[in-house]
Image: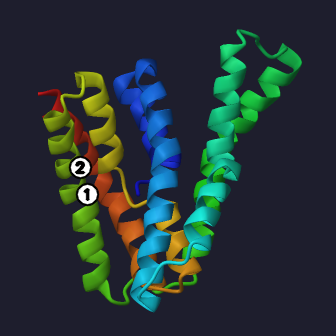
Amino acid sequence: MSNNVLLGLPLAAALLGEDALPSVALVLVFNSLVLWTLVTASVEWARHGAVSRSAPAGTVRSVPTNPVIAGILAGTAFGLTGASLPTVLDEPLRQLAGAAIPLALVALGAGLVQHDVRSRWQVSTGITILKLVACPLVVWGLAVALGLPPLETQVVTLLASVSVGTNVYLMANRFESLQGPVAASLVLSTALSALTTPLMVTLVAA
């Protein structure tokens, strides 16, 4: 799971243009639904040898109430009406949106302070390599095999190449597993993706 909200979305808009945003929105919606369900089922299977019916069902029910997913669905529904917000509401919301990403990054950094990013560095390094190299290459290959159009291929590869997402950290905390290495992989992959993500986008464009 990539850091698609804080990094992937603005990067896609800057590198690929506004036409890429509908594809990004689709990835955001189904990414959370599929990956949270798979992770919940996988952890339950690993711990208990079986998967309860309530856990995946609870995950599916909780996804539409996720603020990111709910915002995308509500924004899409509002856009389909053809209406527009009055300036007295639109301008304050636009200013608030501009501050949201920096504040979210500050909050994320504050949460990571409690973990020693040097602990089990082999694990965090492995996670980072899988995320920044293996994941985008696999996604790129699948996009080509499925015959996705060029823009959609660039979108999914870009999003796959972005650093480890904050949801992975939330999962680690929820299941009380690998919190330190996951926190370290967030920091390490975010720093290195400044080099690897533009490289992946260039390769796909070529």
Q: Where residue 202 appears, x then y in whole percent?
A: 18, 34
User: Is there a contact, CB below 8 Å, between mark 1 and mark 2?
Assistant: yes
Q: Is residue 10 visible?
A: no
Q: Where residue 84 appears, x then y in whole percent?
A: 76, 13
Q: Is residue 150 left or right of residue 182?
A: left
Which residue is nearer to you in this view: 201 or 151?
Answer: 151
Report the residue marked by disc 1.
Answer: 132
10 Å crowding of disc 2: few (<14), some (14-19), many (20+): many
Question: What amino acid is at disc 2?
Answer: Pro
**Residue found at x 72% / y 28%:** 94
**Residue found at x 23% / y 46%:** 139
Q: Is residue 131 left or right of residue 31?
A: left
Q: Is residue 205 above or below residue 70?
A: above
Residue extending furthest toward the left: 206
Residue extending furthest toward the top: 82
Which residue is nearer to you in this view: 193 or 147?
Answer: 147
